[in-house]
Image (cartoon, rainbow, N blue to C red):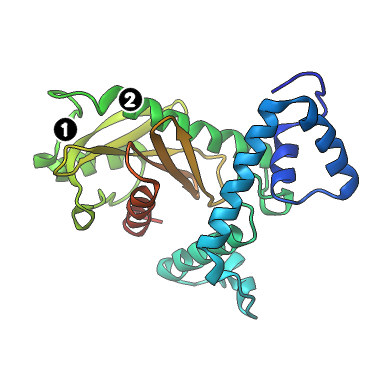
Amino acid sequence: MNDTNPSVTEADLHAYADGQLPETARARIDAFLADNPDEAAMVAEWQAQNTGIRSLFAGYEKTKETDALLVSPPRGSSSGRKRAAIAAAALLVFALGAVSGHYGPAFLEKPELQLAASETLPKQAETAFMVYAAEVRHPVEVFANEEAHLATWLGKRLAIENLKIPNLQSLGFKLVGGRLLPVDGRPGAMFMYENQAGERLTVLVGRNTENRTTSFRFASSDNLETFYWIDGELGYAVTGEISRETLREVAEECYRQFPS
């Protein structure tokens, strides 16, 4: 980021893109963006993402008396109800336009740590895809014919009880296999899938104890797309050189199948 105005942080730019700043603060950011075209282009892209996702989730932008339960579910609720509440709350956040990357201090116990952890995830997912997806003979450590062993092994390394590897055959992708790899300096997992056209995608799973908030975001790098989210301590990223719509469908299916 340009150092000519060090008082303008990335969090400020996210808040600006989300329309969360008062007019006085917006004027300061306007002046900064006028002098920094690269940052201005980045903010414009975030705002375009906001507009697209607001449109996609417009049907969820409704207020109900039970909305408070989505954020603070009653004690004793089942894991299924908790998962549904998390999903509904995430969709509500989407509809309010907070998806571009900054959800505000009220939602985060440690916003600076949450931002740092979530921002590293897509880059690590992109790197893993670029390194392994092109491999012909050794794309994974354990192939799909040993799926049960793969799930048990990686589940133990990531401390995920009863880890289930997502089945994406309904979307046209078969499991190639998986491998252990570092994510944020801790044991992480990568699962690879392939369709009949030979297109591959990867699903990255990593644990970060600083994470407490579920968030959903897109990241793009040339033709490479990543859809990623954080569910409790676990971060997930789906990456591939496929359409964003297909990637979103895969991510939603993974979200349904991964443990909460």
Q: Nearer the viewer, mark 1 or mark 2?
A: 2
Q: Name the secondary structure under disc 1.
A: strand
- Please provide percent x and percent y for residue 132: 26, 25
Q: Is residue 198 left or right of residue 207?
A: left
Camera sees residue 250: yes
- Could you tell me the amino acid type at mark 1? Val
- Please provide percent x and percent y for residue 133: 25, 29
Report the residue at 15% width, 43% height from top.
Answer: 147
Task: Kindly indicate the quadrant of the structure image that contains residue 238.
Answer: top left
Task: Kindly indicate the quadrant of the structure image that contains residue 124.
Answer: top left
Front-most of 29 and 122?
29
Tell me: residue 109, above or below residue 135: below
Q: Earlier in the sequence, mark 1 or mark 2?
A: 2
Camera sees residue 235: no
- Could you tell me the amino acid type at mark 2? Met
Residue 142: mark: 1
As drawn, which residue projects farthest toward the bottom?
A: 65
Report the residue at 79% width, 25% height from top.
Answer: 35
Q: Name the secondary structure under disc 2.
A: helix
Report the residue at 37% width, 31% height from top.
Answer: 187
As drawn, which residue projects farthest toward the right?
A: 24
**Quarter of the rendering occupied by the C terminus:** bottom left
- Please provide percent x and percent y for residue 99: 59, 50
Q: Which residue is mark 2?
A: 130
